[in-house]
Amino acid sequence: MAERSLDAVVVGSGPNGLAAAIALARAGVSVLVVEGENEIGGGTRSAGLTLPGFTHDVCSAVHPMGILSPFFRQLPLAEHGLAWLRPRASVAHPLDDGPAVMLRRSLDRTAETLGRDARAWARLVGPFLDDPHALIADALAPLRVPAHPLRLLRFGLRAGWSANRLARLCFRGERARALLAGCAAHSLLPLTQPLTAAVGVLFAITAHVEDWPVAEGGSHAITRALASHLHGLGGRIETGRRIERLEELPNSRAVLFDTSPDQLARIAGGALPPGYRRRLERYRYGPGVFKLDWALDGPIPWRDPACRDASTVHVGGTLEEVCASERDMYRGRHSERPFLILCQQSEVDPSRAPAGRHTGYAYCHVPHASTADMSDAIERQVERFAPGFRDRILARHAMGPADFERYNPNYRGGAITGGIADALQLWNRPVTRLDPYATPNPRLFICSAATPPGGGVHGQCGYWAARSVLKRLAVSADRARTPERRAGAGGRSASRR
Ligand SMILES: Cc1cc2nc3c(=O)[nH]c(=O)nc-3n(C[C@H](O)[C@H](O)[C@H](O)COP(=O)(O)OP(=O)(O)OC[C@H]3O[C@@H](n4cnc5c(N)ncnc54)[C@H](O)[C@@H]3O)c2cc1C
């Protein structure tokens, strides 16, 4: 294909860039993806960060939104090598006293660990479990008339509060409150802010629909499958080609940026009006993360061995402690007892480590562009619930905000989810516009996690951006539908337990 004939170029091959390219290619649009790194994948790559034989996920690790993504679910990703491996539980939340709280697919088995709040938990999430995909489709979309308005309204009435408030309103005991707090802390917001309950409840619902899986072999299997599918549809990918100026791109009718808003402003330069560029530059990225990867000579020695069932362990204690940790980082302080998102991929996927050995991964939220070394605080928190943990460490690898930004320029100041997703910036990202994916230049679009519905490996930002492009290119309905029908007939990604 001569470059002159290209319909669309996508800058960046993260999950959203590839999803956008696939959605375009399925509509018969010729598309080229240009990636700055030598390897595709953005926040969905894996690497041997510690010792030979150990595979670590550099960024994303556990993928409830990936397996449940309305767009990914349409794609034949299993045929392209993606196998989701499910744990026996999505989340373990250890506490100082008593057994860990376990979030399992079964409501009854989850309830067993919630004590007196068992019925309250079922009342909170149960009403959404008869058709959860409808709710997830509306939640993973830009602001629009929802496809299932009553369901979304019902969800909003429960989940419009702050997580702190909802936990105290719904639950009387520490255990359910802590579980909701851990799920809500994925928002990277103080848990006293509105909408944090929505994040907590939505994550909890996903765990009752699917056990939060890892990708066999490493998270890079997700973007490799997307890339392979894209190739099959005729799309092309070029790696090792970082774009600094618009003029470096081949001619095309549309350009989609899987980049941070500041990069869009810089690369597009005078092709965008100064007012719009200023608004991109004012975009709020928010807190960063500090992450450790470990090569371990055995499993994490949790005081409650049930924790080994979970792909994700929320380490941070009670609702009050999780709230304090997240409030601190938002106010520019470093918590002495940070809340951790800990993933134990090798418990689910033995291919990640040599026989009998394990990988571990944990990160905490830190202030934007923090330079603090949180290694000791993180390991102390794990040791608190898994005495003897430090003795299992064969090697460790640390990444702070500056490392993440070097690794991927989208992670400004170490912010990993495409920017703050509070009530002011969740749907109005990157700027307030009727169509947030379009820019004032009819040729330029943005499709990264800095657009709705925001961070996570789900490809929905790319999918919705591609729809915006297709409207602009006025691809005829026939041309758009035919390949979709073909691809829509494909199977789902393989899943194994
Ligand atoms: C530590 C960490 C843990 C995470 N954990 C999870 C998790 O467990 N589950 C989950 O769902 N999500 C997780 N995430 C979030 C998830 O990785 C991101 O939200 C997701 O990758 C965003 O996808 P994207 O396509 O918008 O951008 P990215 O994945 O950031 O991809 C952007 C791509 O564009 C390229 N690029 C940027 N600028 C240019 C340029 N100028 N020229 C050419 N190429 C360019 C980059 O190199 C990159 O490959 C995590 C992220 C981090 C960092």
Image (cartoon, rainbow, N blue to C red):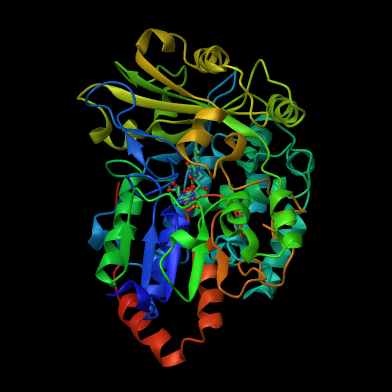
Q: Write the residue at 21% across / 25% down.
A: 354
Name the foreground residue: 260 vs 18: 260
Q: Quadrant of residue 332?
A: top right
Q: Quadrant of residue 29?
A: bottom left
Identify whether 69 is placed above or below 104.
below
- Left or right: 150 with respect to 69? right
Residue closest to the eye, 256 or 167: 256
Count the labels in the image: 0
Q: Is residue 392 above or below residue 215?
A: above
Q: Which residue corresponds to the image point at 33% horizontal and 51% vertical from the top-left?
A: 239
Q: Residue 100: x and y, percent? A: 53, 27
Instruction: Give the percent coordinates (x, y) of residue 196.
Output: 71, 45
Residue 74 in sight? no
- In the figure, 142 relative to 169: above or below? below
Q: Dividing the image into 4 quarters, which one contains the N terminus?
A: bottom left
Residue at 51% in and 55% down: 245
Near-viewer residue (64 or 472): 472
Q: In screen coordinates, is 151 left or right of 304?
A: right
User: Where residue 272 sits: x, y (%)?
Assistant: 66, 64
Q: Quadrant of residue 153?
A: bottom right
In this view, the residue in front, 84 or 3, is: 3
Does 95 sit above or below residue 153?
above
**Residue 492 rendering spot, x and y as whole percentages:** 32, 65
Q: Residue at x 68, y 49 (%)?
A: 421
- Asked if residue 433 shows in the view, the reply is yes
